[in-house]
Image: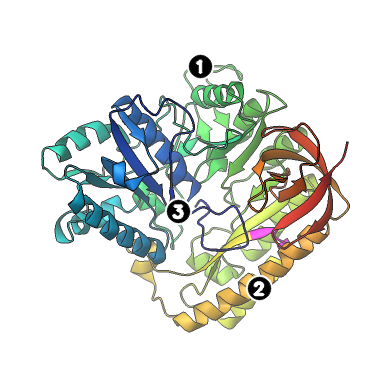
Amino acid sequence: MLDFVTDKTHNEARQGEAYAPFSGDPNQYKKRFYIESYGCQMNFADSEIVASILNKEGFGATRNLEEADLIFINTCSIREKAEQTVRKRLTEFRKLKEQKKGMLVGVLGCMAERLKSKFLEEEKLVDIVVGPDAYRTLPGLVEEAESGQKAVNVLLSREETYADISPVRLDSNGVSAFVSIMRGCNNMCSFCVVPFTRGRERSRDVSSIIRECRDLFEKGFKEVTLLGQNVDSYYYTPESTQINSPETPVTFAMLLEQVALISPELRVRFSTSHPKDITDDVLHTMARYENICKYIHLPVQSGSSRILQLMNRTYTREWYMAKVDRIRQIMPDCGISSDIIAGFCTETEEDHKDTLSVMEYSRYDMSYMFFYSERPGTLAERRYTDDVPIEVKKRRLQEIVELQNRLSQESNKKDLGKTFKVLIEGDSKRSDKDWMGRNSQNKVVVFAKENYALKKGDYVNVKVEDCTQATLLGKIVK
């Protein structure tokens, strides 16, 4: 499961952003579309695929709702709160639609299948509903909706990877970009709806991934993040490949190396790893290449072996801690982050303490933390009773957040006096006199511009002089 943004210690979290194109002539399009994305990084990447498809049909992106002919909201079903937010936004869009004749409103992504009837018929909130595997059919669905019909396609696919579509980089800083390498998920975690909304795993053609990453680098991008619900299970058997022989399957470790070899100036990140699938081959590949960032998002979800079994995570707390040990053995400087759920079905105080102890052991740099929210259609909904009172869930979550805040602070303090290679991503949010970038461990670093002739996309060495819970503060060193 990709990182879902909720209670957090991560200052890069994005939720519900409206996008406009990174480049292109705004006057070349006769119609406009507006899109908001919620949830995981995959949803943001999917919005860039949708933008590419709509561009070819004569639609240009806009940040201005009032001038949009098409409004799309790219949805997430991971938590109930996200669904409430989406429903509220759709209600607001409907009011706008009443004022502008011909405007269409559509829902994309993970909520499409489950709530299509409610959105289309009962509440009459939308005109178009499109699932994550059906974006190619958008032109026909838009045409259908323009004729007054309700347009729906929520069919899942065993083949669709959108490998041949070049995404439109929406609201990009021109430095970092997402590259989807696979779709779907085969892990039937009992709390998660993703296998039902995104279908089974299928890996994208390796040559198309390399081509997209190389094209991004040639256009000036300096960092790519390889995306998948579980990137470590990437496995592609190409008809022909330059890696070895035509019959050689390409594993994630092999793909990672091929992307790193594009250029030492191109940083490579990835998300997300399932603990059971990240191999020594991946870890050794990361250690071998300086431009593969030393950072792993390794969701634990719970520190209790009993709860992990109920979650169908297929590992124990001891196994997970051994994996953390292995990462640190091969890459002592590797940053590690996690996903943590408080208050899963039947969770006791002892189970909760187990989670806190695994956090202490793993020393996470940051975590995505939320209390359990039962999702319709999941295995947990069918098998278990959501029996932990909401006030207990919230209290346990608060204890998890407080612990992570301390761990994040301690992690940052350990970096005082160290010098890091930082990729400049842009101005600091607080002052245009400061740069903001990240180091290999995915930590945000803020530092004064001074009189150096630097720009976005440049690498610079920064010595850490101070820190907050979420940010390293430093000074450029020659």
Q: Secondary structure at mark 2?
A: helix
Amino acid on which the number 3 mark rests in the picture:
Gly
N-terminal label among 3 and 1: 3
> Tag on residue 402?
2
Q: Are marks 3 and 1 in contact (CB under 8 Å)?
A: no
To which residue does mark 3 refer?
A: 39
Q: Pick whichever, 193 or 47, lies toward us.
A: 47
Could you tell me which quadrant the C terminus lies in? top right
Residue 293 is one of the magenta-drawn residues: no
Q: Give the CA distance from mark 2 to mark 3.
A: 23 Å
Judge whether residue 42 can be spotted in this image: yes
Residue 460, picture quadrant: top right
Tell whether 302 sits left or right of 312: right
Q: Which residues are magenta?
A: 361-366
Tell whether 346 sits left or right of 363: left
Judge whether residue 378 can be spotted in this image: no
Amino acid on which the number 1 mark rests in the picture:
Ser
Where residue 13 appears, as percent x and y from the top left, is 55, 54
